[in-house]
Amino acid sequence: VFDSSELGPDAPAEALPDLPPLLQPLAGDPDFERLMVELAKAKPKAEPAKLGVRGPNGVIPDAIVPKMRCVVIITDVHVPDNDKPLWKAFLKFVADLLPDEIVLGGDFLELESCSQHAGANLIMYAHDVDAGNAALDALQSASPATKVTYLEGNHETRLSRFLSSKAPTLMGSLGLPAALRLDARGIDWVPEDQQPIARGDLDILHGHQMGTGKAHSLPKYHSNRAIEVYGRPGRTVTYGHTHKPQRMTLPSVGGNKRAVGLGCGRTLKPGWLHGSEAGWEHEFGLAYIHPNGQTDYYQLKVVNGVFVWAGHVYDGNA
Ligand SMILES: [Fe+2]
Ligand SMILES: [Fe+2]
């Protein structure tokens, strides 16, 4: 209890801390001033925050995320048409975070060599495969212990569609899992018809599977479509393919159904768009899975190759 009898007539004015504007009317009240001096003395000295070291730069405070499984989801990278600053920043992030798992959400490869679009460039299949292997090498050397799971997207299925129409006798003798040496890399391959995969309360798929009509296109409100097809009470379905971030929540008995469409990792203005506005954005996902399965799912926006996470700026232009 503060004893005001200790307050001398000349209380040390210089020891009085600066008062915020709201408290200034109380200045001059000896009891108040003495209390403020005592409080200032009692205040512990500020120490720089101590961060647990999860990666080489120590940017992720381990104390905050104990025993949680950490899954990073990046989709629609379309190597070799990946956005170079984004990819560089992403690799730095992975090297810091050392996540338990990275899910490549489909269309990791562009595979233009197998495109049957009229305007496709003549690219050698070996060139596409080499670019894919180089990108996987970079990803796995950023965090060697991270489990990688590769979802087949519609760009990966270009190979089987090309073979079935142009060289059906080669069907089954050429495949991306072998070309990308996924077995040797320890990477799991998830074919389009075995998606979504479940991680915590997230269900993850590429997204082309929701397409309708001849063109297998997705509607403008694709997150609505995702809930219609894959929505489950209390769970979140997340997907790529559209390259356009979008989310929706639908009330449901047993928990809301949620859908999160992720942006992409590819370049945003490829020549074949001929300048049209596609609405694509750069983004990837980060999920922390609690021991009870609750999943905190963040979408990290990347703008011009730069994003911020855990107080650290990741700049792929540097
Ligand atoms: Fe895509
Ligand atoms: Fe796609």
Image: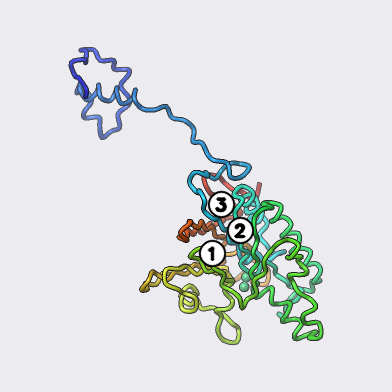
Callout 1 environment at 10 Å: few (<14), some (14 to 19), or many (20+)? some
Q: Residue 99, relative to residue 233: is it above or below?
A: above
> What number is the disc on residue 260?
none
Q: Amino acid at mark 2?
A: Glu
Q: Earlier in the sequence, mark 1 or mark 3?
A: 1
Q: Who's the residue at 53% across and 39% down the image? A: 51
Q: Which residue is mark 1?
A: 199
- Whole-percent x and y of residue 159? 74, 77
Task: Tell me the quarter of the picture where residue 111 sits.
Answer: bottom right
Q: Who's the residue at 70% across and 55% down the image? A: 140
* The residue carrying mark 1 has its beta carbon less than 8 Å from ligand 2: no
Q: Residue 42, relative to residue 159: is it above or below?
A: above
Q: Amino acid at mark 3?
A: Phe
Q: Residue 45, relative to residue 136: is it above or below?
A: above
Q: Mark 3 falls on what kind of element?
A: strand
Q: Amino acid at mark 1?
A: Arg
Q: Nearer the viewer, residue 291 or 205?
A: 291
Q: Which residue is mark 2?
A: 101
Contact, CB < 8 Å: mark 2 with mark 1?
A: yes
- Whole-percent x and y of residue 312? 55, 45
Callout 3 environment at 10 Å: few (<14), some (14 to 19), or many (20+)? some
Q: Is there any visible trace of residue 274 in the rendered image?
A: no
Q: Earlier in the sequence, mark 2 or mark 1?
A: 2
Query: Which color scheme did the rendering employ for the protein?
Result: rainbow
Q: Mark 1 falls on what kind of element?
A: strand
Q: Nearer the viewer, residue 106 or 254?
A: 254
Q: Nearer the viewer, residue 248 or 195?
A: 195
Q: Who's the residue at 52% across and 51% down the image? A: 67
Q: Which residue is mark 3?
A: 307
- Whole-percent x and y of residue 58? 58, 41
Q: Quadrant of the N terminus?
A: top left
